Image (cartoon, grey):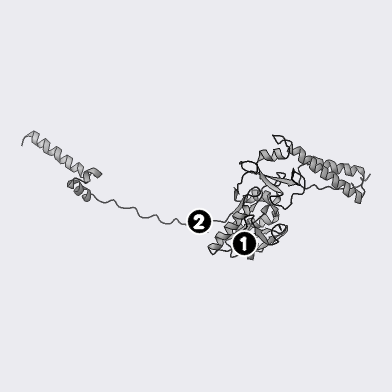
Amino acid sequence: MNLVTFIALFLAFLCLSGASKLPPTPSSTAHSPSRLYFRSARPQPAFLPPRSTPKSKQLSGITHRTIAMAKLYFRYGAVSSAKTLNLLATAHTYKAQGKRVVVLKPALDTRFGANSVASRAGLDRDADLLLEHTTVLPTALFADCHCVLVDECQFVSAFVIDQLRQIATLQNVPVIAYGLRTDFRSQLFEGSKRLFEVADSIEEVKTTCTFCNKKATFNLKSADGVPTLEGPQRTLGCEELYLPVCSAHFGSKLGLEPSGLDLHAILGKIDLDKAQELVAAASAKAPVEASVVEAAAAKAASAPLASHVTIDLTPPSPVSK
């Protein structure tokens, strides 16, 4: 055997040895029995054992486990944005699944009946509990409950909102509150303000402006068909009283400047006029010194955006000499 023949046989051996270690390509395995042989002769890889379940963390001898806690949801929107319709649809879904829900609403909302939670679309159901300003929620009512639904939550007091927060946290029951964000003067309601402070999830229920296709973010109030900023904050009404509008039409319908910067001055004048009326009425019942009346009016003027003006007409105590 000469040297050339030996080298050729050695190279052929190396090629065959290397081919047995290479993974076959799809095209080669379909036409090459030898490649199929080499593939079947390959040792199969050992699979890794499944991961063991992680142990609970130990801290100071106390076992801590991660528990999914229920949340307090605040779903707000302008008037006529189908908030109550969403509430009733959610209640229907829970009921169809054989789950129990508790529906709450403010006692002052009597538009569709004292105990009725109704949508303008025609759906309704009875509330399980009517909420007053100082209502203490019975914990037994939510013992076997899967969800708590609150309608018109802007009229609910901060005291009750804090209890709803505790129901979600301590009793692990999700609470979904539906309501307005601001009143017709673009100021927060008490219940809405507290929900913005303590809710886990804040979601907007959107609708369009009555006069265009922009998103409505304001509530426009009308008195005898004329847009107004006057009147008490809590005035019940439907479409004949309140309309959802965008910021541009809120200003234009009320005669505000395009920048809306004079809204502060207008609201301040309304509050000042209201303060002076209260001072005059109180003075007629119990005459006081002129200096006390002037001081009360000045105090009201210093805080023009207060939605509730409180005036102290108590004469100052004499200074001892």
Residue holding disc 1: 102
Spot the residue most to the right: 321
Left or right of residue 128: residue 268: right
Q: How many marks?
A: 2
Q: Quadrant of the C terminus?
A: top right
User: Which one is in front, 37 or 228?
Assistant: 228
| Amino acid on which the number 2 mark rests in the picture | Gln
Q: CA distance from mark 2 to mark 1?
A: 38 Å
SS of the residue at dot 2?
strand
Which of pointers 2 and 1 lies earlier in the amino acid sequence?
2
Indicate the position of residue 240 as horizontal and vertical percent values.
Answer: 71, 50
Left or right of residue 83: residue 321: right
Decide: few, some or many residues near mark 2? Use Cα within 10 Å; few <14, some 14-19, many ≥20.
few
| Amino acid on which the number 1 mark rests in the picture | Val
In the rendered structure, find residue 58 and report the number of the disc placed on it.
Answer: 2
Depicted 151 relative to depicted 209: above or below: below
Q: Are marks 2 and 1 in contact (CB under 8 Å)?
A: no
Indicate the position of residue 178 as horizontal and vertical percent values.
Answer: 63, 53
User: Which one is in front, 299 or 96?
Assistant: 96
Indicate the position of residue 124 as horizontal and vertical percent values.
Answer: 63, 60
